[in-house]
Image (cartoon, grey):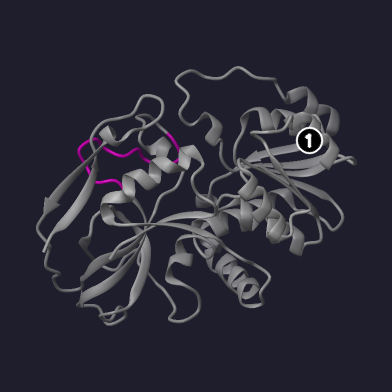
Amino acid sequence: MQNRTILLASRPTGVPSVENFRFETREIPAPGQGQVLLKARYVSVDPYMRGRMNEGKSYIAPFEVGQPITGGMVAEVQESHLDRLPVGSLVVANLPWQEYQVADGRGLQLIPAGQAPASYYLGLLGMPGLTAYFGLLDICQPQAGETVVVSGAAGAVGIVVGQIAKIKGARVIGTAGSEDKVAYLKQLGFDEAINYKTTDIPAALAAAAPHGVDCYFDNVGGPITDAVYDLLNTGARIAICGQISMYNATEVPVGPRPEAKLLKTSSRLQGFTIGNYYSRWPEGVQQLTAWYEEGKLQFEETITEGFDQIPAAFLGLFRGENTGKAIVKLA
């Protein structure tokens, strides 16, 4: 039996390519006392991982060249020397990209049987859903009747942000990069959805938000964000979750400076990462699960099959190939 693993072969300059990854085959390890043997079932690919391919200080340590890449994973227990993790149970954790691995139980979250699809613990009930939950409710704090704009609204975080904003009674505008994604956002209940690739963004946003913008959940940055800043109402709240438009830039982009607009509107701008909320994860999972079971939250996955397709699925994020959460399913 093979135990393939994927390593960072080199650090990319600009847009990553398949040459930045290397496959190796290793022996399947044997679990010892207090350990379990895990087999990967679903692997998460996420935009934040692009930053970890670079060298330098950030909010999370970079990947090391020549070492396995790590990320969110749902794995099945194959052998167990831990009572709380019986054979056949599923866990979610941050783990190396390899088919089999031994773990001592630390950091392994047991997935409740039958509550939701296991892959949802990498999406709606995992890091993206929790990012949406805490970023929107803690930072943006939308009120009924306010206008909320979500960039990257058809991504794993954005679709949850928009639906929670609707639950709170807000009017929601989303931007996305294709007509299919625009149609999907409207299906989810977004009041307006804009294809940023085919419209004049400043004009389209102004038409969609005639009374201005009270909350902005920013997954993208760049020209979309510049246009939103021109529409801010007094006391607007902005949560910076991601800046995918700049992740592959080889030079620092020069754009409008927002400080004067924030000053004039007394707006609050706050960046965050989900790591700020680790202590409150159970709260978020409980509420997201309740909304899901009540039928108030829908979720979409773009599933690629095969361990060897993990790099391709990751690279597809930067071409906008996914709607909702990008997941790789293993046999």
| Residue 132: quarter of image | bottom right
Q: Position of residue 145 (x, y in %)?
A: 87, 55
Establish if 140 lies above or below 247. below
Q: Position of residue 243 (x, y in %)?
A: 56, 35
Q: Quadrant of the C terminus?
A: bottom left
Establish if 107 lies above or below 205. below
Exactly how many numbered labels are in the figure?
1
Q: Quadrant of the N terminus?
A: bottom left
Q: Residue drawn at (48%, 38%), measured in percent from left and top?
A: 319
Magenta region: 58-69
| Residue 33: quarter of image | bottom left
Element carrying mark 1: helix
Circle 1 crowding by C-alpha within 10 Å: few under 14, some 14–19, many from 20: some
Image side of residue 281 versus residue 103, left or right: right
Query: Is residue 66 within the magenta segment?
Result: yes
Q: Position of residue 124 (x, y in %)?
A: 54, 63
Query: Is residue 226 within the magenta segment?
Result: no
Establish if 76 lies above or below 326. below
Image side of residue 280 versus residue 52, left or right: right
Q: Is 132 in front, or is 211?
A: 211
Q: Residue drawn at (20%, 73%), measured in percent from left and top?
A: 34
Q: Is 130 in front, or is 174?
A: 174
Answer yes or no: is residue 77 visible. Answer: yes
* Amino acid found under the numbered disc labelled 1: Ala
Q: Residue drawn at (36%, 70%), measured in percent from left and top?
A: 91
Q: Which residue is mark 1?
A: 204
Q: Is 56 in front, or is 11?
A: 11
Extreme residue in the right direction: 211
Q: Position of residue 62 (x, y in %)?
A: 35, 38
